[in-house]
Amino acid sequence: MLPGIIGKKIGMTHLFTEDGKMVPVTVLQAGPVYVTQIKTDENRQVQIGEKGSTTRNDGYNAVQVGYEEAKESKLSFPKHGHLKKSGVGKNLKTLKEFRVDTTAEFELGQEIKVDIFGEGEAVTVTSTSKGKGFQGGVKRYHFKGQHMTHGYMTHRRPLSNGATGPQRVFKGSRRPGRMGGDTVTQKGLKVVKVDAERNLILVSGSVAGPNGTEVIINKAAR
């Protein structure tokens, strides 16, 4: 069984439990994904050209899957050739590789849906947080700021960059700069509901990023 799936954040809503407790949930579209490549640690014969062949070993077991169809013109030439070679027959925009223990149950072009997850299961979700652009220290790092009165001409401007002694600014100092747009991994989210017909999965709490952002949903390691 595939340990994870690619999806997209739809938005947030809430559900009520049997005892009347409200639970905030995030709706994620999970799949369907299609197997585009199978890697194995076993030796196999690979055809090279019309007459030649060689033995190849990938060194590990993994399954590469593709998600979300796109226009053919939007794909790069290498990706287009890779998908054509796999025989999937779809122009898939996103490719992602998942490590597996064995590849015996997978085949090229196989469709994998959200039913690999079950209600009550713990998952790990990786997404990209909202981009805030260039921000100052008060917003980015919660600096206190300066006084609003008593003759202060600036209020949100950062002050000293450091002591006189080093005569330089240390690397990694908290300064104004680009905020957000980071890869965020949230662990221990609980699967509240699975809608296999619409390929939807509802997880407890919030997931980083705006609606429509791409997410990777993995089964929790522990």
Image: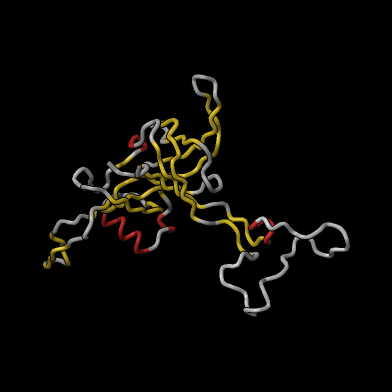
Q: How many marks?
A: 0
Give residue 191's position: percent from left, percent from top. 43, 34
Q: How is the image coloured?
A: secondary structure
The extreme front residue here reads 165
Q: Which of the two residues, 6 or 177, is positioned nearer the viewer here?
A: 177
Q: Is residue 75 above or below residue 213?
A: below
Give residue 37's position: percent from left, percent from top. 27, 53
- At x 53%, y 24%, the residue is 16
Which quarter shows the N terminus? Answer: top left
Q: Which of the two residues, 46 or 16, is positioned nearer the viewer here?
A: 16
Give residue 165's position: percent from left, percent from top. 65, 79
- At x 62%, y 74%, the residue is 169
Residue 130 located left or right of residue 156 = left
Q: Is residue 190 above or below residue 182?
A: above
Residue 194 located left or right of residue 152 = left
- At x 66%, y 72%, the residue is 162
Residue 136 located left or right of residue 4 = right
Which quarter shows the C terminus? Answer: top left
The extreme right residue here reads 151
Give residue 184's position: percent from left, percent from top. 49, 52
Q: Which of the two residues, 13 or 176, is positioned nearer the viewer here?
A: 176
The extreme top residue here reads 19
- At x 60%, y 62%, the residue is 178
Residue 164 located left or right of residue 194 = right
